[in-house]
Image (tube, rainbow, N blue to C red):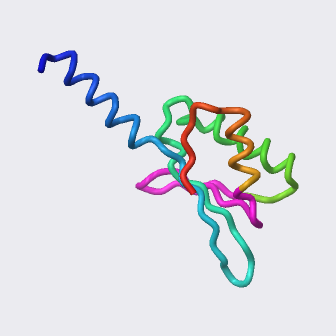
Amino acid sequence: MNLEDIFNINNIIEDLDKKITIKEIKRKGRNKTIMSGICTYSELNNDTVIKNIVKDIKTKHGCSSSIEKDSTGTFITFHGNQKTNIINYFKIKYPQIVISV
């Protein structure tokens, strides 16, 4: 095993860690859709890009949302059941991104 193989293995491991997770929860009797892991992709790890994604989804599907940041990353909360809308948006706009439900 040479250095090139080791770097290829590291790149594969980094790619496996990249995924956006979408889950639906119910808070106070209302449905919420939470999206996390968006900052694992370097092309999406920018406040302006994240805000544009949220704005596109909000205007297209008529929902409200909030962006929260903590030590583990950025979480986007959409009001209502928006899971299929988010998945379809990323399939069209960013087909290379892996989404986990």
Q: Which residue appears farthest toward the bottom when viewing the image? A: 29
Residue at point 47% right, 57% down?
A: 70
Residue 16 coordinates in the image, percent (x, y): 39, 40
| Residue 41 is one of the magenta-drawn residues | no
Q: Is residue 37 left or right of residue 28?
A: left
- Could you tell me which residue is drawn at 59 percent across and 57 percent down? 22
As drawn, the residue found furthest toward the front would be 1
Q: In which quarter of the image is the N terminus?
A: top left
- Does residue 36 appear in the picture of this structure? yes
Query: For this rendering, which residue is in front, 36 or 6?
Result: 6
Q: Position of residue 83 (x, y in %)?
A: 70, 58
Which image quadrant: the C terminus? bottom right
Q: Give the range drawn in magenta.
A: 66-83
Residue closer to the observer: 7 or 34 = 7
Q: From the image, give the main secondary structure of the stretch colored magenta.
A: strand
The residue sitting at 79% across, 59% down in the picture is: 64
State left or right for residue 1 relative to residue 66: left
In the depicted structure, whether residue 73 falls above or below residue 39: below
Q: Residue furthest left?
A: 1
Q: Where is residue 17 in the image (x, y as percent from the top left)?
A: 39, 43
Horizontal side of residue 40 vs 59, given as left or right: left
Magenta stretch contains residue 81: yes
Hey, which quadrant is residue 98 in on the image? top right
